[in-house]
Image: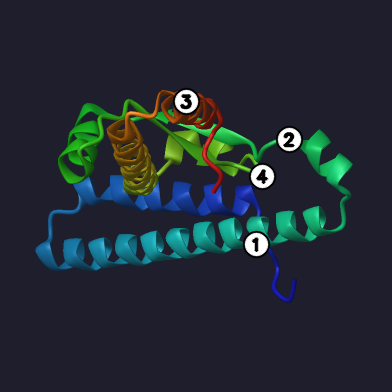
Amino acid sequence: MARDMPSPDDLLREQQAMQLMAEQLNNIDDAEQLLQAVAMVQEQGKLVEALAKQFEDDMAAYEDEVKAELTEEQLEQLGPTPRVEVVLTPQQRARVQEETGVDMTSVKIPDPGGMMTRGMRQASPPEIEAHALKQAEEFNVMVAAHQQRMAEIQKIRDEIHATEDEELIAKAEALIAEMLAEPPKT
């Protein structure tokens, strides 16, 4: 990689700096100074967000590079990408449900480098909520695809039953039962 990859410690250090800056806002009485301090916190927030994005992108690229060098057998031994499960707050749950119609109690976030796990105390609630919204939207797409598949199967089933050919109906029902037992191919 051409650029230096930020470490989880770099990200945590910047998050902690932002948290300290935000805590100091309560000690400022002057409106002009408060506005300047808020602007500094916002800039620090942008830095933290950029570092987190860079770290996530670099980790994904590194993971792809490593996986490209491995055999299928080695990839199977690695297993899935590590994830951390985060419980949503009642407010986050309500917003996700309102926006997507999905009631989620938690969200699973990819955590290949362990950064999210180590920095959980400083985790960004909007970032966690964004992951939850994305997963809820993916769930809705999956449900819609399943419903479409089931509607198509029912249409075919109705057409076959309309023929009143008992042998054809029996074969079709067996084939449909076999199809439903297999996970859909994506």
Q: Amino acid at mark 2?
A: Gly
Q: Are marks 2 and 3 in contact (CB under 8 Å)?
A: no
Instruction: Choose the circle earlier in sequence order: 3 or 4.
Output: 4
Colouring scheme, one of rainbow, by chain, secondary structure, one colour: rainbow
The amino acid type, in three-letter code, at marker 4 is: Gly
Q: Residue at x 87, y 42 (%)?
A: 74
Kindly indicate whether the residue at mark 2 contacts the one at mark 4 (C-beta within 8 angstroms).
Answer: no
**Do tag 1 and tag 3 residues touch (Cβ < 8 Å)?**
no
Task: Tell me the residue that label 2 is attached to.
Answer: 79
Residue visible at 81% across and 43% down in the picture:
75
Q: How far is disc 1 from disc 3 in space, using C-alphas?
A: 58 Å
C-alpha span from label 4 to label 1: 10 Å
Of callouts 2 and 3, which one flags the residue occurring earlier in the amino acid sequence?
A: 2
Q: Are the residues flagged by discs 2 and 1 in contact, CB closer than 8 Å?
A: no
Q: Residues within 10 Å of mark 1 (few under 14, many from 20)?
A: some
Q: Label 4's element?
A: loop
Numbered circle sitting on residue 167: 3
Quarter of the image for residue 35 reads bottom left
